[in-house]
Image (cartoon, rainbow, N blue to C red):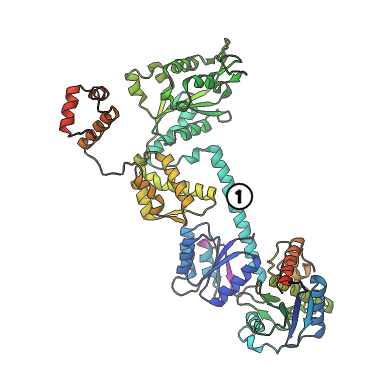
Amino acid sequence: MTSKKTRIGLVPIGEVPQITSKSVAAHIIGYLDLDVDILPALDHPSYAHNRKRLQYDAGAILKAMESEPFHGHAKLIGVLDVDLYVPIFTHVFGEAKQGGRCALVSVHRLKKNTDGSSAPRSLQLERAAKVALHELGHLFDLHHCMDAKCLMHFSGDLVDLDKTPLYFCRYCSVFLGDALKKLAIVD
Amino acid sequence: MDKKTSIMIVDDEEIIRESFLHWFEKLGHRVEAASSGLEALEKLEKSPLEVLFVDIKMPGMDGIELLGKVKEEYPETIVVIITAYGSIETAVKAMKMGATDYLLKPFKPEQLSLVLEKIAHQRKLISEYEYVKGRLDEITRFDNIIGQSPPMQKVFDLIPEVAQSDSSVLLVGETGTGKELVAKAIHAKSDRSHLPFIAINCGAIPDTLLESELFGHQKGAFTGATHPRKGFIEVVSGGTLFLDEIGEISPKMQIDLLRVLEEKKITRIGDRQPMDVDFRLISATRRDLEKEVTERLFREDFFYRINVITIHIPPLRRRKGDIPLLVHHFLQKYSHETIKRVDRVSRDTMELLKSYDWPGNVRELENAIERAVVLSKSRTLGKGDFAFLRTAPSHVTKPRSLRDMEKSYVQQILEDCDWNVTKASKILAINRVTLHKMIKRLNLKRP
């Protein structure tokens, strides 16, 4: 058994600007020291559209992703530009099952400011990176963190998300390190 | 909300339950789900839960009905109502019935975060309150004497009255009735409450040692007295001295104590110099000292000195109405101490506990509850948890006739005397001929 670097697969779903996928991938490589492959895009998830809510069911998209081949990737992260929801919430920025294999990041609500104006491109990319790293944290079995200065702290709205730093607190870093080591050995 | 909170989602829609489950898993909580009010109640019966998220619209028992039942049976459980069809009336009704919050589906993620913060705050307040209440109970102790029955009410009425005087008090009651608690309550309510309360069980200390314990000794007063030592009467200075089992002390010690009570002076063993002492004496006995005085087994002058005020503490079998109160009090105490959530007793078990005569009184009941809580695997104590009571010697047997009582008593005395009729007749205070006639009449036979 030899340990090797864990590979993450990044899947654009529907139409997503290339720079968004590249930026998210770069952040995962930079912050988590993992290899990331940007995979061919999947079709627009019209199957998950809810006509009453005019939104897309995150659970249904995750389910569809689970059925995709993983090609040696430990985790898959889907990036898309639709308004996501889970049944109890009005919206979500991203979604992942605790300890699961697939996560989603939606840039749909990250493009605006709270006053409705367009957010600068750099801020949009930073927000997408934060959501992606947060959801990846869940895939590596990290829980929400009480520390407001941690990526795993729950952000319910854009104001909270913008306040969240782009790093994990020292406890979450340790747990994440443990999870990554374990995964590398298993692989 | 802090980690490891136990939560249950009660909703008939699977998709909603799953959505909640995934969300709370991300927070690290222990989450369960129930698809109906009945299932929720069944799960609650098996294991306690701290927070419930309940949908209003469910087939069968709806959320409001479930809220009512939960608040009635498990008032400490926090309930948050969730609904897709909200109205102000239902929200007000739910809040009036004790719901902590009300959420309209779908809600913004930050709304759920706010509710969780509110719950965390509420739970913190509850635990702080429980802690402070526990500390107060420990300090005052008066609250630990549980009872609403008329005989106990008489005792409660007497305590503050007696506490205001400085007269000696004699507490009379069977073992385990809580004599020491009453003594502590009198002390706590008296002007001496800021001074020491010292309790001594006279029955547990040999007479020679009791003398040294009460009066103290000088260095070299007896073999082993290598240092001077203050006695309890000196140490209690200004406070209350509680002498339990006062009926057990020797006639010599009765004389010594009588002198102390009359002169308010003591002399350490081995010393010649008497010193002034000030204390309030509360004594307790389970024996009939008045009878012993008439039989000259207890000094009359000492008896009247310690018996300025008498308080009779009723045995538990004379105040069975207090048993449910006591049971709940001890359940709370031992659930807290053992960190096990055992907080209920089934109806038939309560009837069993009420029918038992508790010869060891409140102490026996407390021990029984402690044992049952420690060994119980469920949150509700059943009859099986008190199986040991049925084998214990008790008064729960059917009422017996005078003849049966007489027969078993005489048989017991004869066996104690190894069937020596002369010895037995002396104990029974009858002559030998009468005893022989009695043996024949009662058909008693040597085993």
Q: Position of residue B75 (x, y in %)?
A: 50, 57
Give the quadrant of residue B252: top left
Whether residue B348 is visible here, answered yes or no, is yes
Extent of the magenta region: B96-108
In the image, A162 versus B423, the foreground residue is: B423
Give the amino acid type for the residue marked by disc 1 in the picture.
Glu
Horizontal side of residue B231 vs A138, given as left or right = left
* Residue at 43% in and 40% down: B363
- Identify whether A111 is placed above or below B48: below
Q: Residue under mark 1: which chain is it in? A: B
Image quadrant where residue B116 sits: bottom right
Q: Residues within 10 Å of mark 1 (few under 14, many from 20)?
A: few
Image x and y of residue A135, in percent: 71, 73
Measured along the vertical axis of the image, is residue A97 above or below residue B249? below
**Looking at the picture, how far across and down is residue B14, in whole percent?**
54, 76
Please give the name of the residue rendered at 53% of the width and 61% of the height, measured from the top-left corner: B49
Number of marks present in the image shown: 1
- Dominant SS of magenta comes to loop
Q: Nearer the viewer, residue B183 or A145?
A: A145
Furthest toward the front, the residue is: A1
Name the image quarter holding the N terminus of chain B.
bottom right
Magenta region includes residue B205: no
Measuring from the top left, give residue B93's x and y in whole percent.
51, 65
Q: Disc 1 marks which residue?
A: B128
Q: Relative to the observer, which residue lies in front, B209 or A128?
A: B209
Which residue is found at the position 28% from the left and 44% from the top?
Answer: B397
Q: Is residue B329 visible?
A: no
Quadrant position of the C terminus of chain B in the picture: top left
Q: Horizontal placement of B350 versus B409: left or right?
A: right
